[in-house]
Amino acid sequence: MKVKTRFAPSPTGYLHVGGARTALYSWLYARHAQGSFVLRIEDTDLERSTPEAIEAIMDGMNWLDLAWDEGPFYQTKRFERYNQVIDTMLEQGTAYRCYCSKERLDAMREAQMARGEKTRYDGHCRCDAVQNAHTAAEPHVVRFANPQDGAVIFNDLIRGPIEIANKELDDLIIRRTDGSPTYNFCVVIDDWDMEITHVIRGEDHINNTPRQINILTALGAPVPQYAHVSMILGDDGQKLSKRHGAVSVMQYRDDGYLPEALLNYLVRLGWSHGDQEIFSLTEMINYFSLDAINKSASAFNTEKLLWLNHHYIMHSDADYVAQHLMWHMQQHHYDLEQGPDLITIVKLFGERCKTLKEMAESCRYCYQDFSEFDQEAAKKHLRPVAREALERIRDKLAAISDLDWTVENIHTAIQATADELAVGMGKVGMPLRVAVTGIGQSPSVDATVFAIGQTRSLKRIEQALAYINAREAVSN
Ligand code: GLU
């Protein structure tokens, strides 16, 4: 049978890392088995679901490139189908109308609590006598007639066999008084209609599973396999929340992470393959299996994510990194015509920048001129003693023809200047660096000057010389 998995978010907020990991596992499982991956939007909670959240979730999925093969399906568009199944169940006797008043239910609950029992529906309306005494025109809910004996047993693909006695489960409401079907019921019908073979979801749904299995069985529908993934905790052992920093997938985009780095991080957060840490997407797909998922909760570790991101920045195709850098460059409104192409930036700054956000900030001087120098750097390196070095390097750089404007030739010019003045390279390199970048740190100075370009570098050296002269005039 063709494997079919699904990701079924409730659109009440953005796509968070926990949801993204569940989506990734479902996606990987489907890809590994050459099956199909379905996106289903569980929007039956009309008050909490918003179109913005639907968009935010899809943005997150798209950014991570977790493409779905079918859907998105919306539960709100399937009410007719759910109601049709409920009506059939009423006819067949696997569901019944419950006419109990709120007062009766409250009294029942209070009495159960007073006796120290678990509160549950007592099945009052589940008999012909009550049914015959009422008509469907009266206000009622519809309840599933849960089996009264035996147990539900399923083999969780992560946790192993789980057994729950049916007497622990009460007769679940599947249609409310207003005629709307309830959440657990919609999920069941969807999984059935969409022919889902493997339900991979958060462990917070584990209590729903026996109820869902009972409904499927009552319908004569195939029961999928279930795998419940553990929670993600913050590095302090508490449930991961905003307190721990970013939790929205798109926030990671904003913070300068590459989608592949986040995917690699998420796949390892609760799953392992030997002691391998770095996985290409193809490797993830090839190696992924549910039995290698950890039963216990996983702790989020931002340092490790940062380390992975830096790895991906340095070792991915520069073209791929550049595509993602583009978004950050746009946030700064840089005029990209005014500087090097993004592949050059990735190669130049990759080693020193752990995030794309940092990279976009660091390369500002490649696109924008400045009129002020970093105070500290200028104080140290733009002093009268540096004047001669700057004048000489300026002349040498000016003499390089367009065609010969290469990192090597710039390097040679710096070296020659240092030799002429019988000083170390740093005595030329540092003033030059501060002159062309305005700050004290940059990638290697020859490559930086190359990237900034000849005209601009010369103009900036003049600006630095003027700064030195002005400084000298003040101190005299
Ligand atoms: N809609 C549920 C959620 O967002 C998931 C339900 C399921 O996967 O069965 O938590």
Image (cartoon, rainbow, N blue to C red):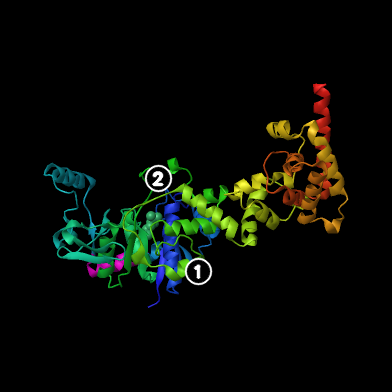
Query: Dot 1: within a 10 Å radius of its alpha carbon, few (fewer than 14), some, or many (20 or more) residues?
Result: few
Task: Please state which amino acid type lies under the numbered disc 2.
Answer: Asp
Where residue 406 appears, as percent x and y from the top left, is 79, 56
Query: Where does residue 412 sit, x and y in percent of width and height?
Result: 79, 52
The residue lying toward the viewer, choosing from 288 and 165, is 288
Magenta stretch, residue numbers: 82-94
Tag shown at residue 413: none
Q: Are the residues flagged by discs 2 and 1 in contact, CB closer than 8 Å?
A: no
Mark 1 — residue? 282
Judge left or right: residue 5 versus residue 321. left
- SS state under label 2: loop
Q: Is residue 228 magenta?
A: no
Residue bearing mark 2: 235
254 left or right, relative to 263? right
Residue 66 against residue 35 in the figure, above or below: above
Q: Main secondary structure of the magenta part?
A: helix
The residue that appears at 23% across and 56% down in the rendered structure is: 98
Residue sitting farthest toward the front: 422
Residue 23, position in %: x, y? 44, 60
The reply to whether the residue tagged 1 has its Cβ within 8 angstroms of ligand 1 is no
Q: Quadrant of the N terminus?
A: bottom left
Mark 2 residue crowding within 10 angstroms, few (<14) / some (14–19) / many (20+): some
Q: Quadrant of the C terminus?
A: top right
Q: Is residue 123 above or below residue 104?
A: below
The answer to whether residue 299 is left or right of residue 374 is left
State the residue at coordinates (26%, 69%): 217
Counting from the top left corner in percent of width and height, residue 59 is at 54, 56
SS of the residue at dot 1? helix
